[in-house]
Image (cartoon, rainbow, N blue to C red):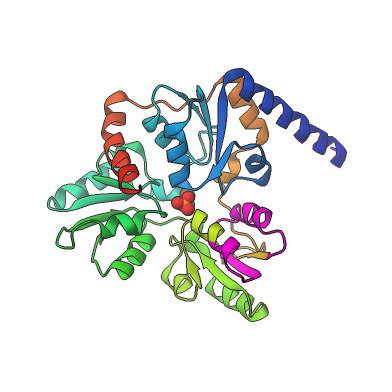
Amino acid sequence: MLKTDKVQDEKSLKDEIKQLKVQKNAIILAHFYQNSEIQDIADYIGDSLALAQWAKETDAAIILLAGVYFMGETAKILSPQKKVLVPDTNAGCSLADSCPALKFEKFVKKHKNHLVVTYVNTTAAVKALSDIVVTSTNATKIIKSIPKNQPVIFGPDKNLGNYINGLTGRDMLLWDGACHVHEKFSLEKILALKKQYPNAKLLAHPECKRPILMISDFIGSTSSLLNYSQTTKTKQFIVATESGILHEMQKKSPHKTFIPAPPIDSTCGCNDCEYMKLNTLEKIYLALRDENPEVQIDDQLRINALKPIERMLELSK
Ligand code: 13P
């Protein structure tokens, strides 16, 4: 296909999506890790917490969640009366997969006196076993609000759990899970980049391994990293999180330079989540046109999973 055809195709797809949104009273919520063309047609782009908050508050009849499946599930749990669509049901999450509900239930039952705090990157079934859900934006604040003598289970991300243990002086019991994207940043390649760009600041998501966090200048959720890149005077950044965030960073600060932190196993400089990148404009168009695939959750499971999410939203205020 000629390049001009592709551009034309993208433009007409975007026009069709816009029309469908108006016609069906639909909105598109997109995570920062989505491809740039998806971010550009979204009504809201945000981190996991913001996506949940918007899903709860919107008046739209249809929510199309461009992210990974647990994000669509969270939207449905919060807004059961709305139709929640996802572009591709195969867009899973390695962190959520690292915590199967049956195994987690056994773990929770073994430690009955523990409060169960889980990261939002989990299935509805794991949320239903939890007392409080957190995202990387509010995790530290919420953990700090729990009395120190209360034992806590934290799952599934051991890197985020270790990071919060270090910040709060707690000794939370950690589930052994991790995000396959954040785990594969190369310390050596990042150190080489730091040498090459001595004035650049290293920004890292707390899902990264400890050695990366130890050499970082700023650690935070995607929205915190974005905010920091805008407000600090620094002009160059090495960014250790999924590379989709660079699109919004560059848009917000066009005069600054953003360098993606490289993974261990690739000659490409970027670290992409292949699940996030399964979503395309075409799939979004088809999902809106056909109102399918739709996220469905059993009602009792939804009610059980809602409680810890609502607790999070309350504690995030
Ligand atoms: P935040 O959206 O909370 O920054 O977390 C990123 C993530 O893990 C998405 O899977």
* Span of residues in magenta: 228-256
What residue appears at the point 26 percent right and 47 percent down from the top-left corner? Answer: 104
Residue 88 image-quadrant placement: top right
Q: Position of residue 52 (x, y in %)?
A: 43, 39
Residue 128 image-quadrant placement: top left
Q: Position of residue 123 (x, y in %)?
A: 36, 40
What residue appears at the point 65 percent right and 27 percent down from the top-left corner? Answer: 285
Residue 303 sits above or below residue 92 on the image: above
Q: Position of residue 90 (x, y in %)?
A: 51, 37
Between 232 and 265, the residue placed more toward the observer is: 232
- Classify the position of the N terminus by image quarter: top right
Assess whether residue 253 is covered by the magenta stretch: yes
Residue 218 is left or right of residue 263, and the answer is: left
Q: Is residue 28 visible?
A: yes
What residue appears at the point 57 percent right and 33 percent down from the top-left corner? Answer: 28
Residue 65 is left or right of residue 296, and the answer is: right
What residue appears at the point 43 percent right and 39 percent down from the top-left corner? Answer: 53
Residue 12 is left or right of residue 298, and the answer is: right
Q: Is residue 176 visible?
A: no
Q: Position of residue 145 (x, y in %)?
A: 25, 56
Residue 104 sits above or below residue 6 on the image: below
- Residue extending furthest toward the left: 113
Q: How many marks?
A: 0
Assess whether residue 257 is covered by the magenta stretch: no
